[in-house]
Image (cartoon, rainbow, N blue to C red):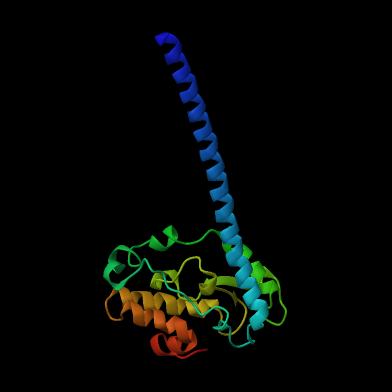
């Protein structure tokens, strides 16, 4: 009788384990689908917001972001207290930069929702740029901090890159606070260029 009970106990235990395993597998699949839907929801919300607010006001001169659509966002994991172990470490931005597949999808959605220059939808004509740059503690993946910046205009992404490098050096050398550096990009980077780099071309 004891042998039969042991056999039954093992069989029942095996059934419970199988059920648990099936339940865990189903839960993992649900969580994966939920993550995918959440990401899709962010992109969809960004696109709907673009349609509702209208196109970006780009010109042949200026490519400033539309702050109603993409006001910029900072990285909550970067603070003044930890810049020596984050943004001021060479190569750190590569550890937080979002994949090209994500930024290309966002760029496509933004361009086709009206965030473009004179109806130009050629993705190669734009750089999906961080409003607050990663090297100054910008949010890596928030749609609020990414916009399709025209490459081939007078005040292009190349000029903004110069300012980004300059502000990064000032913040990491202690000549400018992190918050002050971020504020330059949250308002009007062209004015920041004139102040910290030199006259605009």
Task: Determine the residue positioned at 39% across, 86% down.
Answer: 196
Of residues 50 and 140, which is closer to you in this image? 50
Q: Is residue 61 above or below residue 11?
A: below
The location of residue 2, given as percent across then percent down, is 40, 10
The location of residue 131, given as percent across then percent down, is 49, 76
Quadrant position of residue 168: bottom left
Total labels: the figure holds 0
Q: Quadrant of the N terminus?
A: top left
The location of residue 89, given as percent across then percent down, is 33, 63
Quadrant position of residue 88: bottom left
Of residues 95 and 144, which is closer to you in this image? 144
Specify the farthest residue to the front.
1
Q: Is residue 4 visible?
A: yes
Task: Determine the residue positioned at 32% across, 71% down.
Answer: 79
Q: Is residue 124 visible?
A: no
Specify the farthest residue to the right.
119
Task: Determine the residue positioned at 71% across, 82% down.
Answer: 118
Of residues 147 and 142, which is closer to you in this image? 142
Q: Is residue 155 left or right of residue 180?
A: right
Q: Is residue 13 above or below residue 74?
A: above
Q: Is residue 156 above or below residue 12?
A: below
């Amino acid at each position: 009788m004891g042998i039969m009970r042991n056999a039954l106990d093992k069989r029942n235990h095996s059934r419970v384990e199988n059920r648990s395993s099936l339940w865990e597998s189903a839960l993992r699949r649900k969580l994966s689908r939920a993550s995918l839907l959440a990401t899709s929801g962010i992109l969809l919300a960004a696109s709907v917001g673009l349609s509702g607010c209208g196109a970006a006001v780009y010109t042949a001169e200026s490519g400033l972001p539309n702050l109603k659509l993409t006001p910029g966002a900072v990285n909550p994991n970067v603070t003044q207290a930890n810049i020596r172990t984050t943004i001021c470490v060479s190569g750190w931005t590569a550890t937080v930069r979002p994949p090209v597949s994500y930024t290309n999808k966002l760029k496509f959605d933004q361009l086709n929702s009206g965030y473009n220059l004179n109806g130009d939808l050629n993705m190669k004509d734009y750089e999906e740029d961080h409003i607050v740059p990663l090297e100054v503690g910008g949010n890596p993946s928030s749609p609020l901090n990414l916009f399709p910046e025209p490459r081939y205009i007078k005040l292009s992404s190349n000029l903004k890159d110069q300012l980004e490098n300059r502000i990064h050096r000032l913040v990491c050398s202690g000549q400018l606070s992190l918050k002050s550096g971020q504020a330059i990009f949250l308002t009007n980077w062209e004015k920041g260029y004139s102040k910290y780099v030199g006259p605009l071309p």
